[in-house]
Image (tube, rainbow, N blue to C red):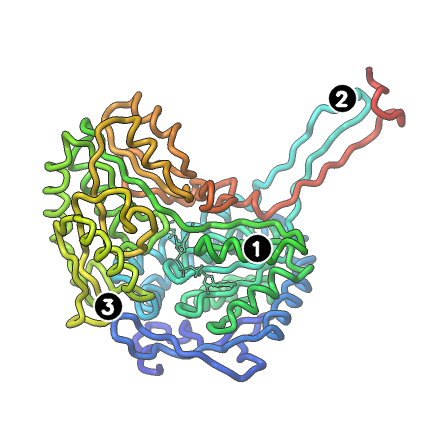
């Protein structure tokens, strides 16, 4: 443990506590849990196994801090968020090391995540002073209607392990810009990246109680329930699986919370005959294999039109072969281990091969490298009956199937419960517009494998959830609208007719 923090330029960024009301604390239960490096299976450190008393203390602290934080001007809050952004950039290398140690992702991806996180603070530092209201002409000429935006209050943020800092940053930056205070429940697999966020927030000048982080592993369900049932908590923002998102929604029904749910995907990646093959291949490599296939926007189902199938699959295999799977700490590794195990990846490959898919690349686990390592895999001759197409793999498997017509591919792409990201490769502008309008997904990427940007609204439809993060819409999700009507004659309905 000590050995790991000593590898950092600033060892004080590695903190094995929860952060409640401006203090680094153990759990009142006195219990802790271990955090493991998925590449080496070595213990990285330990964190408090927080209980309901701990989370209630955090909720109370956030409630106490709310009136003062919301009373600051957007400009004042924006200055703190700007400093937050600068501190993340300054500590990029250490943050990258911490992310790699607990999540496993390769150095480039980990430092990239630090920059991605920083960007949310920069973007929302600029949004904070620009949260405008509205003036609406009233139907009665003597009246006036104002629309005022107000922070919702105490927000609970529940984040996943695949982007242990960025998924938190996306929420915290927007919530603080809006004037909300927060209780973040970090993922038990990757708590240290969220703790860095709290430590840098403190250095940036976030007042005590405004940003609380509670760590837990086994107690996660009971902490989730407490957050959902609390009447002090006004909103839950969750990123994770559709299963847990639905549970949180059910648990929140009595307290009628505002909800943002960023849930699972099963992204189609459609390549039309007229696409530029090199653009399609470069985009496919990023869209599929970023973070070893463990992002919610990862392409899961590849639909390749008959006329380009052979050319695309050959070039895709050639490009993916250039990758190097290994311990994320090694500079040569382009792809790290799977963070939470490789069982589903293997199950999907086996199921597909049994149903006559062809292994074009990879296909096997890499026990000689480590228990959680798997080859980057490309399967051909896939069909829609296979698990690899009907379920989100969340692993490094690209499943290629053929299609003939535009009508057919739209129907097959839409034939799933979820609707988060989708990708479309074509040089025909009319087709790009037509198909993107027909796709039942919250996000469509045309001729690119990169979907996310701080300034773009991120989110899904159908069972991929609700709400948007990032962009001007991201801050709206942390605000309530208050209508203020002034003046007029006190005659109901007909006074102006
Ligand atoms: N839409 C998005 O922005 C987005 C981003 C990242 C991941 N995801 C999705 O997340 C999934 C992968 O992550 P996972 O399998 O670890 O998800 P998960 O739902 O199991 O876990 C996500 C978070 O929820 C917590 N959690 C689990 N059970 C809980 C409960 N009962 N109450 C409160 N919190 C609980 C976990 O500790 C973790 O912090 C994939 O489906 C992926 O698509 C979505
Ligand atoms: O995994 C979920 C989010 C990843 C991204 O925004 O690119």
Q: Secondary structure at mark 3?
A: loop
User: What's the distance in space between the residues labelled 1 and 3, CA to CA?
Assistant: 34 Å
Q: Please identify the quadrant where the C terminus is shown.
A: top right
Sequence-first disc among 1 and 3: 1
**Quadrant of residue 15 in the image?**
bottom left
User: What's the distance in space between the residues labelled 1 and 2, CA to CA?
Assistant: 36 Å
Residue 35 position, x and y percent, is: 38, 75
**Residue sitting nearer the eye, 458 or 312:** 312
Residue tagged 2: 139
Residue tagged 1: 236
Residue 298 position, x and y percent, is: 31, 48
Q: Is residue 265 left or right of residue 280?
A: right
- The residue lying at 33 percent from left, 43 percent from top is 267
Q: Is residue 272 left or right of residue 22?
A: left
Q: Which mark is residue 329?
A: 3
Q: Secondary structure at mark 2?
A: loop
Check contact, mark 2 vs mark 3: CB within 8 A. no
Q: Is residue 189 left or right of residue 491?
A: left
């Amino acid at each position: 443990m000590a050995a790991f923090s000593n590898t950092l330029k600033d060892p004080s960024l590695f903190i094995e506590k929860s952060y409640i009301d401006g203090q680094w604390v153990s759990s009142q239960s006195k219990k802790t849990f271990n955090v493991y490096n998925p590449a080496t299976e070595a213990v990285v450190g330990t964190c408090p196994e927080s209980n309901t008393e701990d989370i209630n203390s955090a909720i109370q602290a956030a409630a106490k801090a709310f009136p003062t934080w919301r009373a600051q001007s957007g400009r004042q809050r924006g200055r703190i968020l700007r400093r937050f952004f600068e501190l993340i950039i300054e500590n990029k290398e250490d943050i990258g090391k911490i992310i790699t140690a607990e999540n496993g992702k390769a150095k480039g991806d980990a430092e990239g995540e630090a920059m991605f996180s920083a960007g949310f603070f920069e973007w929302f530092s600029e949004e904070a002073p620009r949260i405008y209201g509205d003036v609406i002409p009233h139907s009665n000429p003597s009246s006036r209607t104002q629309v005022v935006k107000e922070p919702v209050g105490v927000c609970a943020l529940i984040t996943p392990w695949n982007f242990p800092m960025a998924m938190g940053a996306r929420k915290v930056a927007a919530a603080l810009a809006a004037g909300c205070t927060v209780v973040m429940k970090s993922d038990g697999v990757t708590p240290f990246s969220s703790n860095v966020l709290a430590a840098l927030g403190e250095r940036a000048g976030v007042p005590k109680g405004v940003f609380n982080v509670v760590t837990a592993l086994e107690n996660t369900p009971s902490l989730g329930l407490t957050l959902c049932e609390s009447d002090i908590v006004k909103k839950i923002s969750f990123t994770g699986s559709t299963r847990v998102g639905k549970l949180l929604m059910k648990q929140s029904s009595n307290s009628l919370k505002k909800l943002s749910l960023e849930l699972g995907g099963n992204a189609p990646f459609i390549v039309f005959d007229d696409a530029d093959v090199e653009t399609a291949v470069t985009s496919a490599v990023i869209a599929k294999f970023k973070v070893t296939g463990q992002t919610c926007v990862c392409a899961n189902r590849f639909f390749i039109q008959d006329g380009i199938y052979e050319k695309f699959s050959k070039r895709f295999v050639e490009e993916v072969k250039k990758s190097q799977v290994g311990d994320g700490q090694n500079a040569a590794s382009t792809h790290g281990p799977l963070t939470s195990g490789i069982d589903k990846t293997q199950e999907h490959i086996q199921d597909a091969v049994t149903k006559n898919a062809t292994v074009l690349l990879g296909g096997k686990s890499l026990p000689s490298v480590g228990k959680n390592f798997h080859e980057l895999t490309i399967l051909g001759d896939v069909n829609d009956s296979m698990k690899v197409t009907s379920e989100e793999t969340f692993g490094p498997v690209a499943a290629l199937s053929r299609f003939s017509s535009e009508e057919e591919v739209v129907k097959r792409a839409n034939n799933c419960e979820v609707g988060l990201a989708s990708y479309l490769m074509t040089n025909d502008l009319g087709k790009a517009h037509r198909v993107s309008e027909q796709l039942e997904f919250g996000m469509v990427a045309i001729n690119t494998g990169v979907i996310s940007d701080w300034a773009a609204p991120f989110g899904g439809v159908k069972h991929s959830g609700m709400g948007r993060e990032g962009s001007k819409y991201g801050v709206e999700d942390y605000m309530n609208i208050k209508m203020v009507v002034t003046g007029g004659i006190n005659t109901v309905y007909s006074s102006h007719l």
